[in-house]
Structures are given as C-alpha cells and as structure tokens.
Image: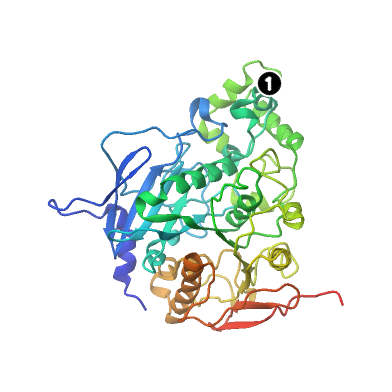
Amino acid sequence: MRKLTITLGLLTLASAGHADDVLPPQVAVEQGKVSGVDADGVTAFKGIPFAAPPVGDLRWRAPQPAAKWDGVRDGAAYGHDCMQNYNAVPLPPGSAPSEDCLYVNVWRPSGEAAKLPVLVWIYGGGFVNGSASRLIYTGTRLAQQGVMVVSFNYRLGRFGTFAHPALTRAKEDGGRFANYGFMDQIAAMEWIKRNVAAFGGDPQNITIMGESAGGMSVHNLVTAPATQGKDLFQRAVIMSGGSGSAIKASTLKDAEAIGLAFGKAEGVAANDPQALAKLRAIPARSVTGDIKLGTVLTGGPRTFSSPFPLGDAATDVAAAYKAGRFAKVPTIIGATSGDLGGRDGMMIAGARDLAGTIAGQGVPTWYYRFSYVSDAAVTPKSDGAIHADDLPYFFDTVDIKYGAKTRPADQAMGHTIATYIANFVKTGNPNGQTVPQWPGYAGAGGQMMDFAADGTTRVAADPWATFAP
C-alpha cells in the first residue's frame, strides 16, 4: 500500500509553500500569467477562470469571456464550487459554494513538457451537485503516468438549467438559453483547446471523461450541434452515463412552467415587465433552494429542470447516436454492477446498448463493467458496486476515499484501471504491456471487460445480456 504520507501530501497540495529563492512554475494563458504548485512530481494550477463570473446581469446568460489580469495569478487553490446543497457522497466538498464558480484546474508532470496527452474530467451529481474540487478527483496520480489532467466546474441546479418566458423573450446571446451548465461545459472545452498548449498539453490529443451526470455530459458533448466539427476532443470515456436519455424528459414549455412557478413563489409575477431583472436579483441561496441529489431520482412534481434538448447546446442524444450524428471518436463505456436501475436499467443495459450502437458505426469501442467492492465500502458486497463506487479507482485515489481502511487489493484495482485510462488518453487504446488485454467491443455477443468482484480482470461476453435470436 502507498504510504499515507502521499495522501497527506495530496490533501495539503493547495497550501504547499515554496522556498523564498525558488520561483513557482508559471504559464501564460490568454487572460494572463498563473503560477502553480509542485508536489509529488506533479505541478498543479488551480482556480483559473475560463469564463466571467455568471453573477448579476450574467445570471442565466451563456458564459462570457473571462477578464484579463495583471501580474501573476496565484494558482495554488481551487476556485469556488458552484451553488448547491452538498451530499456526503462521494466525499465532502472541497471549496465553498458561490455563483462565481467557472474555474478550471490543471495537473501535469513537473518540469518542461510539450504535447502531453490531455484528460478532461467532468463531474457528476445529477446536474444539481458536484464539483471539480472533490479530493478523489485529484489529478496527481494520473499525471504521474505521463498525462495532463484538466477539470472544471459548471453551473448546477436552477443556475445550470432554467427557463422562463422572460428569458425566452429576451433572446440574449443569440437566443441561447436554458441549458447554461451545458454551455459552461462547451465554453470550458473551447478554453482548454485554446490554452492547453501553454501548460504543455497537446490540443490535438484530448480525452473527455465523466461519470453519471458527467457521463451524460460526455454524451452531450459528443452529439451537441455546438461541438460538431470543432475537434474539441479526440476520445471519450463514459462512466455510468446511461442510455442517452435525459434524466427527466422535458421540453421548453415544461421548463418555462417550472420557472414561472419558481418566480411566483419568489414574488415575481408572470406578466411583470421587470420579471427578468427581479429574477436575477433573487438571493443565490434562494435560487438554490432545497434541491438535493436525492430529489433528482424521486418521483412527484419537479421544482427545477434537468437539461433538455434545445438549440445548439443540447440535442436528443439517443436519436443522434442512432442517426450517426455524433463525433466518432474512440470510446470507453460502461457502468457499475449495482448501478441505478438494476441490470435492465438505463445505466447497465443502457451502457451495453450504446456500446453496441457506437461500435456498430465503426467506432473503436471498449465496453466494461465495474464489479469490485472494497472491504471498506459502506454498502454490503451483495449489492454489487453501487453507483459512483468506481470513481476513485479511475483516478487511482482509493486511499484518499478509504484512508487507513484501504487494502492492497483496492489499490491494485485502482492502479490497473488508471493504467488503462492513461493508456487510452495517450494512444486511443486502453491496452499496454503492463495490463491484461482488453479486446474491443463488437456489439451483441462481443467481449467486455469485467473489473471483477474478486479483484481480477475478466474478459467475456456480457453474462447479463439478453439478445433476440
């Protein structure tokens, strides 16, 4: 097992100091210079704005360009998380929440670098929860394998998805509205494409990876009209991203009705000519309300909207895949063995179906299931690996999640999966000399990789699949 001192080094990375006679590493991005922090053979640059703070008159606007700054910006600490009510899973928050939250973070191997392969992480949380500052998302271990890791925040809850007739009528930003979180993600990818070379990354070798709502976000980036033809990424990893269906089917009319009800509850009449200004003046805490991750999965009336197809920022993902309207980049896709909805649900069966759809259009595809459950997990092993159990294994940060309860088998599984991911980011193929062979998926009856409950890797046809004769 790695010594706990490494974990402690990660936990204190943001506050690490430098000797007075040694200048911290610096890079120059389009807005100005930013300094980083060296630790464990990796340089981290945190809290870099990729867009203007979406506050005041910029609330419920498409992301605007970030302002330039003079001097050297300190990149030792994360920027604010986006507004939300925190859940204890997967880990407590890393930064205080604020509407001013559109920041990007970068980890790279220390020293001079050029054309490093780049992995961009998109967090999950039902589009109402999550942040790039969660400790298990630290990019240090993957960067130690010779890749650059980038993460960013995007707006959540009513800040991230909101519609109201006043917004529809305003036609701001060329008529782009409602899916503000998805617009943030697209803006972040465009910023990364323009600036990653300054850190030593290769703008022509970018992999996007996300889990749960982050996996759904990868689906959207692959299919959204706003990303087509821009070459923003060259590979994709989709973890528990579902079948391509939205969290909750919705239309603009549905979302506007929810927005009108919210406005009325806050004293903003539907026919008020100052409705938009009054909505933007509502305190951020009131806009956040009582929305939590659990409310995304429960039935009953909704008081907030999840992302839905509209304009160029979001499309009908499942239909786009079937019609071939997507970026045909090498793809890893899968789910956990105890994922949401069970074996026949949108996560497990959905991943298998989409793997077949993607592979069937000639796209190199690797399909997996994560079945491993740590002895330290809070759920019984009979439940399988529940939704989000896989997260620290993909980052090789299992010891950060489980601390002193971490076992060698946990870390071995984390190192194996992180090696597959690093290989994929580097070459577009997860295979390499130090890990078992993972064959590409060929659709119905094809071979999948099971990161098995006993800590081994197993290649076989999906035993849970049922195919028509």
In the displayed structure, 319 sits above or below 276; it is below
Q: Residue 294, position in %: x, y?
A: 62, 53
Is any part of residue 290 visible from this angle? no
In the displayed structure, 200 sits above or below 147; it is above
Q: Tell me which residue sits at (23%, 51%) in the image.
A: 24
Judging by the rendered image, the residue that carries numbered circle 1 is: 269
Q: Residue 103, position in %: x, y?
A: 43, 44
Q: Give the residue at the far top of this rendering.
A: 273
Q: Nearer the viewer, residue 343 or 49?
A: 49
Image quadrant where residue 379 sits: bottom right
Q: Which image quadrant: the N terminus?
A: bottom left
**Left or right position of 422 against 218:** left
Image quadrant where residue 61 sits: top right
In the displayed structure, 200 sits above or below 191; it is below
Q: Tell me which residue sits at (52%, 65%) in the image.
A: 391
Is any part of residue 171 visible from this angle? yes
**Left or right position of 360 against 134:** right
The scheme the figure's colours follow is rainbow
Q: Which image quadrant: the C terminus?
A: bottom right
Q: Residue 59, position in %: x, y?
A: 54, 30
Q: Nearer the viewer, residue 402 or 195?
A: 195
Crowd tier of the residue under label 1, counting other residues whose Cα lies within 10 Å: few below 14, some 14–19, many 20 or above: some
In the displayed structure, 327 sits above or below 144; it is above
**Left or right position of 195 against 322:** left
Q: Give the residue at the far right of this rendering.
A: 469
> Three-letter amino acid code at disc 1?
Ala
- Count of marks, rendered view: 1
Q: Tell me which residue sits at (55%, 49%) in the image.
A: 129
Q: Residue 213, position in %: x, y?
A: 60, 54
Element carrying mark 1? loop
